[in-house]
Amino acid sequence: MTTEAPDQAARHDPVYDRLHESSEFTELRKRYRGFVIPATVAFLAWYLLYVAMSNWAGDLMAVQVVGNINVALVFGLLQFVTTFGLAYMYSRYSNAKLDPLARNLEQAYRDQAGTTGKRGQA
């Protein structure tokens, strides 16, 4: 017995294959990767800078900024700010650039598979 939701295409469903080959799907992947890959590389570089400076620039990281707050603490807190900032930027980007294409693809799937969601219908 299959536990798959009735409106989801099987992996090798002809509808899925047609949508996968469409220019809209290609554009969706391109836009997604265009944001996620650079953002991931930038974040990892920023994080590795923090780790490297903590390891090899201890004197700089120990500099007091205000009271007992030093550069290392500021860098560490900025990691959290960066994480939430990236999540916010991705959410806005996704809503503006990815979701409209994804909705179009979902509608195309529903149109090709039929309103009942039966797989394999053209």
Image: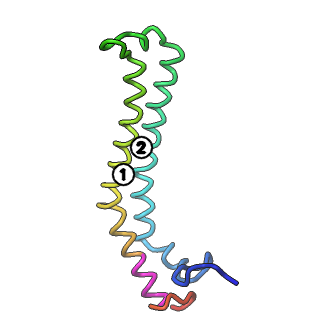
The number of callouts visible is: 2
Q: Which amino acid does the dot numbered 1 rest on? A: Tyr
For label 1, count other residues whose C-alpha is less than 10 Å away and answer few (under 14), some (14-19) or many (20+). Answer: some
Residue at image point 47% right, 39% down: 41
Dominant SS of magenta comes to helix
Residue 114 rendering spot, x and y as whole percentages: 47, 91
Which one is in front, 20 or 83?
A: 83
Q: Residue furthest front?
A: 68
Residue at image point 32% right, 48% down: 89
User: Whole-Å distance between the Cαs marked 1 and 2?
Assistant: 9 Å
Give the residue pinned by disc 1.
90
Q: Is residue 14 left or right of residue 24?
A: right
What segment carries the magenta color? Answer: 106-114
Q: Which amino acid does the dot numbered 2 rest on? A: Ala
Rendered position, 100 above or below 116: above
Q: Is disc 1 placed on a helix, strand or loop?
A: helix
- The image quadrant of residue 27 is bottom left
Question: Tag 2 or tag 1, which sits nearer the N-term?
Answer: 2
Residue 32 rendering spot, x and y as whole percentages: 42, 57
Give the residue pinned by disc 2.
39
Residue at image point 46% right, 87% down: 112
Residue 81 rendering spot, x and y as whole percentages: 36, 36
